């Protein structure tokens, strides 16, 4: 079992994200994690935010819901994702966009995955878990062969490919995303410390490059991730743990303007 509570991920857009480690969630019987947000500018005191954010999990540690609502001056932005799993694989993924909710259905065959996306105007998760009057709006096919993933659209056109290169002990050294029609490419490169944990990740997207540096304590627990661009540290994300080893809070610092965002976590357990 991994000793990590947090699993960082660098998206293909070059954004640092993180999720909660599935085994940790299951072992500790965590049902829900609520996040309380506050922020601070250099000349201000810490200010609480109206942002609402939470994560929900099933009894075996899979994240089944993510909710994030931000209120800006004249605008409210809401991200809402719901997921269902079967035999360790995602079965449906429901998301909210500017129009409403849409749902992706996953069908698994040997070396092939079909993703059917449907739209339903009358679906709302607070009222019903059912999707009525669904309209199929898209289908994507994922083809797997020799550690390579090909994405084919509903017109049968091969749109992009992803593949990885591993070292002798099966650690990923490089991941590549290629767009077939535009010839654009993104590449992630990895180095590791003596414990086999990611130490540095570089991502290059159309000539733009970012570097992510990972820092651990003496027990190999992730403590900090720095984002570098043009030889300058532009962001610093710190993970604060409580006495039980659970994530207590995160501190995100924008080093260009010294703005700080603090996220405090509280936990709800299964009975």
Image (tube, helix red, strand yellow):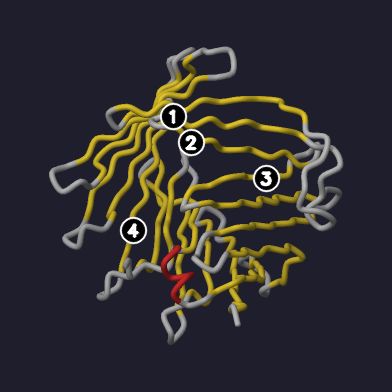
Describe the element under mark 2 as helix, strand or loop: strand
Quarter where residue 105 is shown: top right
The residue labelled by disc 3 is 94
Describe the element under mark 3 as helix, strand or loop: strand
Please identify the quadrant where the N terminus is shown.
bottom left
Describe the element under mark 4 as helix, strand or loop: strand
Mark 3 vs mark 2: give the one in front.
2
The residue lying at 70 percent from left, 50 percent from top is 79
**CA–CA distance between discs 4 and 3?**
32 Å
The residue labelled by disc 4 is 214
**CA–CA distance between discs 4 and 1?**
34 Å
Crowding at dot 1, Cα within 10 Å, few <14 / some 14-19 / many 20+, comes out as some
**CA–CA distance between discs 1 and 2?**
6 Å
- Whether residue 123 is visible, yes or no, is yes
The residue labelled by disc 2 is 108
The residue lying at 59 percent from left, 69 percent from top is 262
**CA–CA distance between discs 3 and 2?**
18 Å
């Amino acid at each position: 079992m991994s000793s990590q509570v947090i699993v960082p991920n660098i998206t293909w857009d070059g954004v640092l994200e993180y999720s909660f480690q599935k085994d940790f969630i299951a072992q500790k019987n965590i049902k829900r994690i609520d996040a309380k947000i506050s922020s601070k500018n250099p000349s201000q005191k810490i200010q609480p935010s109206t942002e609402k954010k939470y994560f929900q999990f099933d009894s075996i540690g899979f994240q089944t819901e993510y909710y994030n609502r931000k209120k800006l001056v004249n605008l409210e932005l809401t991200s809402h994702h719901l997921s269902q799993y079967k035999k360790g694989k995602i079965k449906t993924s429901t998301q909210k966009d500017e129009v409403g909710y849409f749902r992706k259905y996953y069908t698994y065959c040997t070396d092939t995955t079909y993703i059917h996306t449907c739209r339903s105007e009358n679906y709302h998760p607070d009222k019903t878990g059912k999707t009525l009057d669904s309209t199929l709006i898209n289908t994507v096919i994922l083809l797997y062969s020799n550690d390579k993933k090909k994405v084919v659209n509903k017109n049968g056109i091969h749109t992009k490919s992803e593949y990885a290169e591993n070292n002798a002990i099966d650690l990923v050294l490089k991941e590549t995303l290629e767009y077939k029609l535009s010839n654009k490419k993104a590449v992630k490169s990895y180095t590791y410390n003596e414990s086999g944990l990611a130490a540095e990740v570089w991502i290059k997207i159309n000539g733009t490059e970012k570097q992510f540096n990972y820092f651990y304590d003496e027990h190999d627990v992730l403590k900090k991730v720095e984002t570098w661009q043009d030889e300058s540290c532009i962001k610093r994300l710190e993970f604060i743990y409580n006495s039980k080893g659970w994530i207590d809070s995160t501190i995100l610092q924008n080093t260009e303007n010294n703005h700080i965002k603090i996220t405090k976590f509280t936990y709800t357990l299964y009975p």
